Image (cartoon, grey):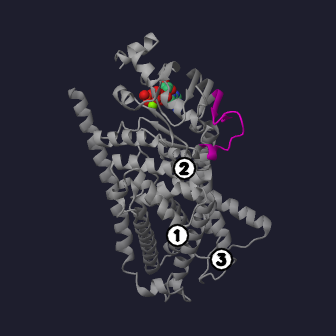
Amino acid sequence: MKLRKVEEHVFLFLMRLSALLIGFALLAIIWSIFSKGLGSLNWQMISEVPKGGYYFGKEGGILNAIIGSLYLSLGATVLALVIGLPIALFINIHLSKRRRLVNVVRLILDILWGVPSIVYGAFGFTVMIFFGVKTSLMAGIIVITALILPIMIRSLDEVFKEVPMGLKEASYSLGSTKSETAYKVYVRQCVPGLVTAVLLSLGRGIGDAASVLFTSGYTDNIPTALDQPAATLPLAIFFQLGSPIPEVQNRAYAAAAVLTIIILVISILARIVGNKYQKNKIKA
Amino acid sequence: MENPKIKVQNLNLFIGKQQILKNVNVEIPEKKITIIIGPSGCGKTTLLKSLNRLTDIYEDINVQGNIFINNEDILNTKTDITILRKKMGLLSQRPYPLPMNIYDNIAYGLRISGRKQKKYLDKRVEHYLKQANLWDEVKDRLKSPASALSIGQQQRLCLARGLAVDPEIILADEPTSALDPISSQYIEEKFVQLKEHYTIIMVTHILRQARRIADYVVFMYLGEIIEQGTAEEFFNNPQQEKTKAYLKGLFN
Ligand SMILES: Nc1ncnc2c1ncn2[C@@H]1O[C@H](COP(=O)(O)OP(=O)(O)OP(=O)(O)O)[C@@H](O)[C@H]1O
Ligand SMILES: [Mg+2]
């Protein structure tokens, strides 16, 4: 009896300790980014594209990378949702009786989730060379879509798995078809989880540098068409951080701060939208 | 029985290698209340779910035999399963409203059947909510989520939702087990009214409830039908030893 109490206390302590460590690490990262970056962060930085000599500490900003990153990640997230949602629903509704097949599909997706993004980038690059395509927004969006699709499908899948059997039965017993059950019942039940899946995918997409390095390229201009190259914030950080000039290095931190703020704002907005639908959810 | 609404013949049901229903033969009279009783785990829910083929959605289920509904074999012909299910309203042990507002819960069945005119829907939603005795409580908050209703209200909502697809049969699986006495009594009384228009099949654990409302009783034990008959015969003159023991309360 006593031993079990001690055990509980030990694990509670370990849990609190790890929560504390994670919280501390997060704060440390945010602190280092903002303390080094805020000094260089100004209106010009987020409202202008790089001027001549920007990378040597002269005038200009990173609007090209901000817009490029938003185009790439939002484009890819929308595409991944449009492709991934039907697949995740199909796995949970049409294949619900084929457990072995579903397990194989899940395993494959989990492996794809774990593949490093540079592999996606290199693969995309090889395909682009084969077809003679130049680096472009389009190519970047496609490669990021491929990168985040397994994340999107698997996180949606986990959400749909939690739909109570009784709700599924209720839907079918009203005479719903499988698609009606999928799109009218499952999707509504899962809106908050859907938001999480989208955010996970978006976060991975907007923060990734390796996959877009060879595929979307880099430019000081804001792309106005899908076949033009696009800059990204992670690459902007990477290039500026590699500079020997301290002022440019600080701008890298400012760019990182911008990236962090964008992710934060999107997350909060999405949560607000998700919570609006939370109240319809039927508890298991 | 003359012209039973539902006739189950030699129904055997396996889940994996386990046989859940053993050579089940049952006849369900039209526009009467049929009560299925039996100890926990004997297959009552499974039998109920075979009737609207909800068993289809589980894996590893193998169903053999015949189930005739209006003389049509729903297991062996190419029955349109959505039409079959619309002939039956299901009330489960625990209410599962759809994840949408109260109004849409009722309108759902109508909408998927292609009825989308707002005026028509408004009228029907009101009608079925009144049928389920819920209208007065929710008429001012039709657009609020169904999940916010109490369990008793949710069960009535599910009744209204089931009636809205205009079924011929009501399947109820211990519909009062999660409810307070007053809500339970309401459901019982409602069923007695509804049998004028619907064939009702209800599973229950509560013998007193069965005595109060049953017209016809089916007694199951370990996947088999032990005895079935009119309520009067069944309760006053049971034939099987197991039935007698169950009625004396020796199983529960
Ligand atoms: N999905 C399933 N997988 C495996 N076994 C199942 C499944 N559903 C039911 N069973 C088994 O089938 C048998 C009958 O179950 P069923 O739910 O029909 O019983 P019941 O008479 O409704 O019981 P209760 O009164 O407790 O609701 C039980 O032994 C149960 O364990
Ligand atoms: Mg049961």
Q: Which mark is residue B166?
A: 2
Q: Picture coordinates of residue B214 (x, y %)?
A: 42, 30
- Asked if ligand 2 lies within 8 A of label 2, the reply is no
Callout 1 amino acid: Pro
Residue B7: percent from left, percent from top: 61, 29
Q: Where does the image place residue B167, in percent across and percent down from the top left?
A: 55, 46
Q: Are marks 3 and 1 on the same chain?
A: yes
Instruction: Check disc 3: other Cα within 10 Å, few if <14, some if 14-19, many if 20+.
Output: many
Q: Secondary structure at mark 1?
A: helix
Q: Residue under label 3, please give it.
A: A229
Q: Chain of mark 1?
A: A
Front-lying residue, A255 or A154: A154
Q: Nearer the viewer, residue A190 or B209?
A: B209
Whether B64 is among the magenta residues is yes
Residue B238 versus residue B157 in the image, above or below: above
In the drawing, what numbered circle is on residue A119? none
Work out whether disc 3 and disc 2 sit on a shared chain: no
Task: Tell me, for residue A234, which label it has, or none.
Answer: 1
User: x, y (%) of residue A155?
Assistant: 52, 52
Residue at disc 3, secondary structure: loop
The amino acid on which the numbered mark 3 sits, given as a three-letter code, is Pro
Task: Choose between B49 and B232: the one closer to the eye.
Answer: B232
Disc 2 residue crowd, few under 14, some 14–19, many 20+, Cα 10 Å: some
Q: CA distance from mark 3 to mark 2?
A: 59 Å
In magenta, the rendered stretch is B63-84
**Along the line of sight, the residue nearer the viewer: B249 or B29:** B29
Q: Is residue B118 magenta?
A: no
Whether ligand 1 has any atom under 8 Å from the Cβ at mark 1 is answered as no
Q: Marks 3 and 2: which is nearer the front? A: 2
Give the alpha-carbon distance from disc 1 to disc 2, as whole Å: 59 Å
Q: Circle 2 — which element? A: loop
